Image (cartoon, rainbow, N blue to C red):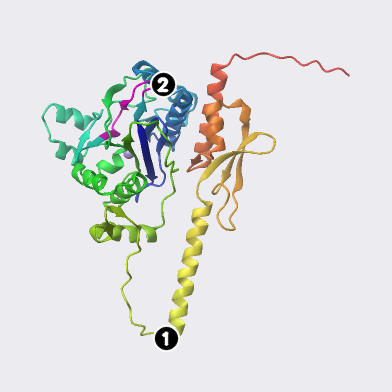
Amino acid sequence: MKLQWGSYTDTGMVRQQNEDALLAEPGLFAVADGMGGHNAGEVASAIAITTLRAALRNGVGDHDQLRELIQQANTAIYTASLDDSTQRGMGTTLTAVAVVHGHHNLVLVANVGDSRTYLLRAGVLERVTLDHSYVQELVNEGVISIEEARQHPRKNIVTRALGIDRNVTVDITPLSLVQGDRLLLSSDGLFDEIPDDEIGAILTRQSDPTMCAEMLVLAANAAGGHDNTSVVVVDVLGDDEIVPVDNIKPVASPSIDVLAAIESIVANEDSSTVSGKRRYSLPKLPKVKMRFGPALFWGSIIAIVVCVLIAVGVFARTGFFLDADSNGNVNIYRGRPGGVLWFDPTLSQRGTVSLDQLPEVAQREVKNHHSFSSSSAAMRYLQSMAALTESTTTTTESSTTTVR
Ligand code: MN
């Protein structure tokens, strides 16, 4: 089975930080939507994704292994929430698609909470997962319709999540894929904002999975963007080996100007679709006759340049990421890895953990410069991960004799 995929995540138009996390790697795809005060949701979804990433080396063998893996993520979040009062009660949803080793076309779809996996087959969009939410229960009992559920004031109440309890029940659905199938994993920021038939239309129209993922998120933002939105689009190309084709990293929110431009593209979608493949083109600006003097003209040019510089500056200085220094200490830096233009990242908080004290998966996250919206969220993640190592390795006591 040959797969191709793309992913995109965005904070949206209302929220201050992105508490979603996603994973798109050969053989394992996931979306997690974190919840909890003081940015704890961001920590919960990051722990879930980190734990899942750990299994990638060996892939997924069967139902039990996948269930065990998700239970591990549950334990890691639950334990971290007990250790830190600011993280008490944090949790995350998780929907994941795992390719099963040794089977040609079989995947397992796991779900806890109200993120979803959809299947688009032969132009028909179907939900593979069932939400664990209060409104879904009302739908099951026939009290409200699926369409009413989308608008329901209690739609955000989940009845199951990772990290809330010592144990978690995971729904696992086996799915046989055929060439041409397209899977969509998504957080509720997408389907709470736009109806399923519109999601289906975008999935059908945009063939490139990366562009499609981006398009879906931008459509959710154009419809209000009240929540973080994360999507992974996976295409089944054929029966060969799985090859990573397009590993797109989550990107930061585009500036408002870019959004406005893209919104207008979404509005004029048909005109920009050429033989099934869409290209981005900037909307034509209305022609304005110059009626004012050159002073005003140059004044506005300077104003625009200043605005762009400020936007770049704000972008360059937002966000925190992890990196190891030359002594092997993991520190928290502010800014963007590698810097943007002349804005270099700066040390925000010196970490108390060294790289080799972290579990291997977390070490990889450090090397990938996993980003957080606040320094304290990054610190809590580091501490949770360091605690994981302590609890899984045997501690050897050593005594030092000082000879004078
Ligand atoms: Mn959400």
The label shown at residue 268 is: none
- If the picture is divided into quarters, which one holds ligand 1? top left
Provide the residue designation for mark 1: 293
Q: Which residues are magenta?
A: 100-118
| Residue 92: quadrant of the picture | top left
Q: Nearer the viewer, residue 24 or 156?
A: 24
Q: Residue at x 44, y 47 (%)?
A: 251
User: Split into 4 quadrants, where in the image is the C terminus?
Assistant: top right
| Label 1: few (<14), some (14–19) or many (≥20) C-alpha neighbours in 10 Å | few
For label 1, the SS is loop
Q: Nearer the viewer, residue 71 or 387?
A: 71
The amino acid pointed to by label 2 is Leu
The amino acid pointed to by label 1 is Gly
Q: Is residue 251 above or below residue 27?
A: below
Residue 355 included in the magenta stretch of the image: no
Provide the residue designation for mark 2: 69
| Residue 166: quadrant of the picture | top left
Q: Residue at x 54, y 48 (%)?
A: 336
**Disc 1 within 8 angstroms of ligand 1 (CB):** no
Q: Nearer the viewer, mark 2 or mark 1?
A: 2
